[in-house]
Amino acid sequence: MKRFVRFLQVSVLGLLVSLWFGNVAIAPAQAHWADLTIADIIVSDTDVQITLTVPTVLLNFADDDGNQTLSLAETAKHRAQLEQQFGNGITLKNQTNDSGQFTLTPAIAQQPEDKITHSTFLLRYKWPTPLQKLTIQYNLFSPELDQAQALATITQGNRTQNIVFTPENNTVEIADTIPWQQQFLSFLQLGVEHIFTGYDHILFLVALLLPGGNLSQLIKIVTAFTIAHSLTLTLAALNIVTLPIALVESVIALSIVYVAAENLWRKQISHRPWLTFGFGLIHGLGFANILSDLTQTQSNLLLSLASFNLGIELGQIAIAVLVFYGMSLIQKRQGELILRAGASVLLVCMGSVWFAERALAAWP
């Protein structure tokens, strides 16, 4: 009876915590996108054109109706302020350290179809003489965004390069080519940060590893997840496989619910690698969402994919090791079954809340 009461207490606490966490701590369907800017930069002889999809929270002064995206009317009304904001936040200089003449085209402003927290603009920078060297400094970040980043694709002639701007790494110089090491490290860091801020992916791993097991079982589960999400991450980034973001995010939430619920009634976990592989295919599509807006040549796409995926794997391994050793410590304590069951109930509740939020957000 005491064990049942303790289990019930843990379950109720788990439900309360999950309701708070699902509704307050995590944005339901835009968790990986909310802090991200996409910049498509085209460099020609004497000018640079930037198509910028930016979090509207950076432009709250112009969001008169508070719907998290700027309309054409709002853009036209606040054009002077927007030009000042973008002109100060994104600085481009040529070989003589002269800033380009900046103009903003409000006609491009629109609500991205599946990114309701963002707005898109066209920025132009022009110089009177041909560009021999270009320095881009990107400082359009907000302290309100915890993981602020700008994914940039830079096209010059038939050469395309990728870079991730962050508050700490905000400047790039284009004279010939961006060193591949800089591109590699940028997307490696992006992958690590993506897995550590992807709370649904983390909780899926936790749910998988809650039953415990030996190191061999851990390796099989992690390997199955790696193979599966690497496959669909690549296919999605190459635009070979695409699914609606809302559907992918909803199934990711359901994967947490199913695996955590299974922990409550199944004792054997020998099937877990196959289960992990199946759900890992969906998680890979979730990982790919962050790269889907980059227009890249295939050579740069492979470099970005490889480094981004490696970053995810490094973060995933670190999480798996921590969970594995955490489970090892729990095995040495009394009430182990209650702790595992309580944690599984908590994960079921959290996944259910996320699923409901994401499904409702996708409803027309």
Image (cartoon, rainbow, N blue to C red):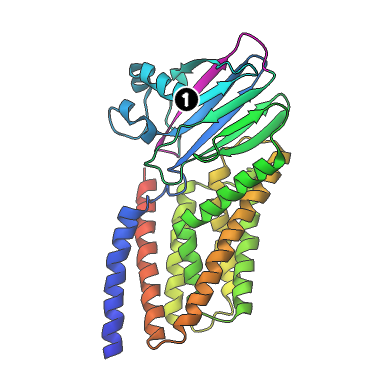
Residue under pointer 1: 121
Question: What's the residue type where badge 1 is placed?
Answer: Phe
Rendered view: 298 above or below 91:
below
Q: Can you name the residue that lies furthest to the top here?
A: 128
Query: Which sits in the foreground, 329 or 339?
Result: 329
Other residues around mark 1 within 10 Å, as few (<14) / some (14–19) / many (≥20): many
Can you see residue 231?
A: yes
Query: Which sits in the foreground, 40 or 327?
Result: 327
Q: Quadrant of the C terminus?
A: top left
Residue 36: % across, % down = 48, 40
Q: Quadrant of the N terminus?
A: bottom left
Query: Which sits in the foreground, 354 or 62?
Result: 62
What residue is drawn where x is 44% and y is 72%?
Answer: 260
Query: Which sits in the foreground, 179 or 14?
Result: 179
Residue stretch rendered in magenta on the structure: 115-131
What residue is drawn where x is 44% and y is 60%?
Answer: 253
Rendered view: 220 above or below 76:
below
Rendered view: 30 above or below 142:
below
Residue 86: % across, % down = 45, 24
Q: Is mark 1 on a helix, strand or loop?
A: strand
Q: Can you name the residue that lies furthest to the front here?
A: 96
Can you see residue 211?
A: no
Residue 178 within the segment the image draws in magenta: no
Residue 316: % across, % down = 56, 62
